[in-house]
Amino acid sequence: MNIGIIGLGLMGGSLGLALKKLSNKYNIIGFDHNPTHTNDAFRLNLVDRISTDFNEIKKSDIIILTIPVDAIISVSQNLLNIPKDCTVIDFGSSKEKISNGIPKKIRKNFVTAHPMTGTEKFGPSAAIEGLYTEKTMVICDIEKSADYQKGIALGLFKDIHAKIVFMDAKEHDRHAAFISHMPHAVAYALAQSVMKQEDPKSILALAGGGFKSMSRIAKSSPNMWEDIFRQNKENLLESIDAFNTEMLLCKKLLEEENWEELHQWMAEANKLHDIL
């Protein structure tokens, strides 16, 4: 099968690495609007070859969209004349607007998915082996996909050893706001608050593992995360309100020197790791 990967950064490049292990089954063609990315992806052996012809990518058996969420909707408008058996899979981090924004003529060709994995790095050089192995792959609104496309997508996800979960797109976006999108907002806010108060030399000298772990995702691409925040705005606002409520409670307990209740508040938060 010919697979056209549109977007050769962390997600697309890592997918190429995973699928190239199955060279008897898949032929990987890379496409990216950034010529540096295409050159790097080929040099790093993330794909079998590069194409600069979008019409050639449209003839692929499978098209994977590993590009920003707004771009996924935009590109879908240019796929109206794909072959009837073509399977298009998107890896967007927000799902409802993508699921509803795909042209009706080709909606059955699409499988909308979100791999719950990644790092703060981006670009082809960020691609890593095993990024998808044993990671959750959420498939949304599967009833809108044709049976043939379902089978192709499920087979591919099993080939990269992902754990498959089915979910309604609206439900996914609310959960993702709390589990992924709000933590990114918090990391950006943490980075901003520290940089506006502390001397860079002090940050370098004193920042330990805890701070580095919490602030790591503030390195994530603003281009990508601005689009995600825009698409999932309402859910993100709800999750930020919930976070702010807890921060205000913490502040109140500190102001009142209510150490016993503060201790209990922290102990309740510890229970999260009984679930994870």
Image (spheres, rainbow, N blue to C red):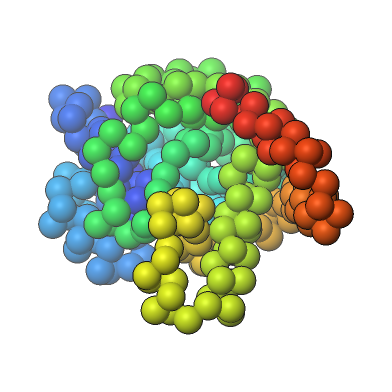
Q: Position of residue 26 (x, y in %)?
A: 24, 31
Q: Does residue 256 show up?
A: yes
Q: How many marks?
A: 0
The residue shown at (65%, 51%) is 182
Residue 178, picture quadrant: top right
Q: Is residue 129 left or right of residue 155?
A: left
Coordinates of residue 264 in the picture (x, y in percent): 75, 34
Camera-nearest residue between 64 and 212: 212
Viewer-proximal residue among 13 and 182: 182
From the viewer's perspective, tell me whether residue 207 is left or right of residue 258.
left
Q: Look at the image and tell me in which quarter the N terminus lies.
A: top left
- Across and down, in percent, residue 160 comes to 32, 27
Q: Quadrant of the C terminus?
A: top right
The answer to whether 192 is drawn above or below residue 138 in the figure is below
Q: Is residue 114 above or below residue 121?
A: above
Q: Residue at x 62, y 40 (%)?
A: 179
- Image quadrant assignment for residue 197: bottom right
Residue located at (38% from left, 24% from top): 134
Q: Which residue is nearer to you in this view: 21 or 60? A: 21
Q: Nearer the viewer, residue 169 or 178?
A: 178
**Residue 127's spot in the image, x, y percent?**
28, 49
Q: What residue is at 78 percent from the left and 54 percent from the top?
A: 254
Residue 57 visible within the image = no
